[in-house]
Image (tube, helix red, strand yellow):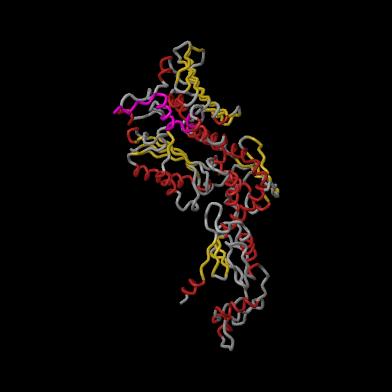
Amino acid sequence: MSDIIKLLPDSVANQIAAGEVIQRPASVIKELVENAVDAGATKIDIFVCDAGKTSIQVVDNGKGMSETDARLSFERHATSKIRNAADLFNLTTMGFRGEALASIAAVSQVELKTRTADDDLGTCLCIAGSRVESQEPVSCPVGSNFTIKNLFYNVPARRRFLKSNFTELSNIITAFERIVLVYPDISFTLSSNGALLHNLPSAPLRKRIIDVVGKKLDQHLLPISVNTILGKISGFIGRPESARKKGAEQYFFVNGRYMRHPYFHKAVLNAYERLLPVGDQPPYFIYFDVDAKDIDVNIHPVKTEIKFENEQSVFTILMAGVREALGTFCELPTLDLSGSEDISIPTYDATSKPDTLKTDYDPHYNPFNKQPASNVVPNNWQILYTPSDKKDIGSLDDDAQFADRKEQPQEQSIFDTPYSLNDDAPCLEDSSPQHYQYKGSLILTAVKSGLLMVNQHRAHIRILYEQLMALHSHAITGASQKVIFPDVVEISPKEMLWLEQSNDTLSALGFEIQNPGNGRISISAVPATLTDIEPNILLRDILSCADETDIDDPVSNLVLRIAHASAIPVGQVLSNEEMESIINSLFTCQNVNYTPDGKRIFTILPQTDIDGLLR
């Protein structure tokens, strides 16, 4: 029997490794920028074309590479970061495995120009599909200049799985922001198809955070600083009023590396307990500085999940640090005396006599006088206890009270006769009483089969969703309601990118949004059906969609987000007419059972169950 186990060729092995390391254009940028940081660069420029599918260029002014190092850097497991297995437990650099450049070169066409400060000439190296095509001297500045073209050109199946340009560019911005928030002392730029998206000069950490996420958090950041024997925790957290239902900026970093850590996230949320409504998420930018031997960064292919040796202790310290920051800085506002008007404070004069208080009173008032004053209306409370032939108010039974209500004339409505608009609609009683609201959440209505209970918030979401989707599907421009004073909202570059992508859909729905520049937008009109919510609050909630890039139907997702933001909230008191309008509109929808995101809208308590409860 012949041998069947063979060693894979290097080109195939590199492509397999690329499947773990290089998942999309954002992965290429992450690896190249991390290498530039490790090379000591103080300025890093990134240029992408067609969201990185056509080309990616990363230019840095780091120490560069010699001719030999440039060639050797594209070999698998070639690295300057570790020398033995013990070094894996004392990592202080970003990259260390030596697979990044080999994986990139296996699935793209790479050109590298690099020079060290000791060399007069640099090296230009061209590689395609792991095969070296040329290597020659070249005149270039100190540092490295990587150009990656036609990513996945030789793996068409992988290329077909790439998302739209908007989605891939959003992922690039996310990877970019996770790095620049760690290194505020390095200058970064990011350009897409010739347009500058980010221009970040070196700055203090707080300024870097504001430059990345926008000025909307400028007044809401609270510093946090904790020093213990386990390490140092520093950074910024957001005031409770800056929390959002979705899309809050939340970042953990450890030893200069971005990480995801649900356990530590829970510690932060515990610190905000009773300060935020249920479901709200606070922004935070928290940096851990710990001994490299106390963490393991090699447990995940993309190194975003990191294991701490003393997680429970760090959890407690983090929660205490966040609580201390909230308690120290979230105080009552102080009196602001910096206004333009002068405030005159009188000085004490010992010779002057203070004014005495003067009060008015009735000298003829006598509390023991049995005769009431002429201007007082007598309160004949004794008649409540006088026996009579009629029942007093306290003895009226429930049937008598409801009998009196039924005698009052009722307006004609769809509840006066049984109907069924579709198979999902319940059949209502012939003489349905008026609707009742339970705890500001449920609308209760009698139907033939029992008691109909409708969630008012979810019902309104379904109604608004179908109304707005009908406008979009029929290419009808929705009616707009002008805003008297347009609201100006600070947004981040990613949110601006998303807004430009969704502008046509928003305009068709009735929004009018202007872009005055400087990271600001103004909303001057909203759909006529959405006038019960503040435009800036509505727009901020809509912009939370900027983080939802991997979606199959962006229009449906946008409309659903608008419906969620605009629907009647839980707890809002409704009149009988408003409740009837919701019921009427709900049972004309195509789907009355569930919201577009799959939550049940109504249920019916059967009459037999009600009768059983009263036995």
Query: Residue at (58%, 31%) from the top-left corner?
Result: 197
**Magenta span includes 11:** yes
Query: Residue at (55%, 78%) from the top-left corner?
Result: 398
Tell me the quadrant of the picture where the N terminus can be found.
Answer: top left
Depth check, front residue: 430 or 95: 430
Spot the residue most to the front: 1
Depth check, front residue: 156 or 480: 156
How far from the left and from the top, in percent, is residue 139? Answer: 51, 12
Residue 207 visible in the snapshot? no
* Left or right of 504 on screen, residue 104: left
* Left or right of 603 on screen, residue 65: left
How far from the left and from the top, in percent, is residue 415? Answer: 63, 68
Query: Residue at (45%, 44%) from the top-left corner?
Result: 325
Residue 292 visible in the snapshot? yes
> Which quadrant holds residue 72?
top left
Q: Is residue 55 shown above or below 382?
A: above
**Magenta span includes 562:** no
How far from the left and from the top, in percent, is residue 444? Answer: 56, 66
Depth check, front residue: 497 or 415: 415
Question: Which region is colored magenta?
Answer: 1-28
Spot the residue most to the left: 1
> Which quadrant holds residue 390?
bottom right
Spot the residue most to the top: 120
* Left or right of 89 on screen, residue 283: right
How far from the left and from the top, in percent, is residue 460? Answer: 60, 57
How many badges with numbers are in the image? 0
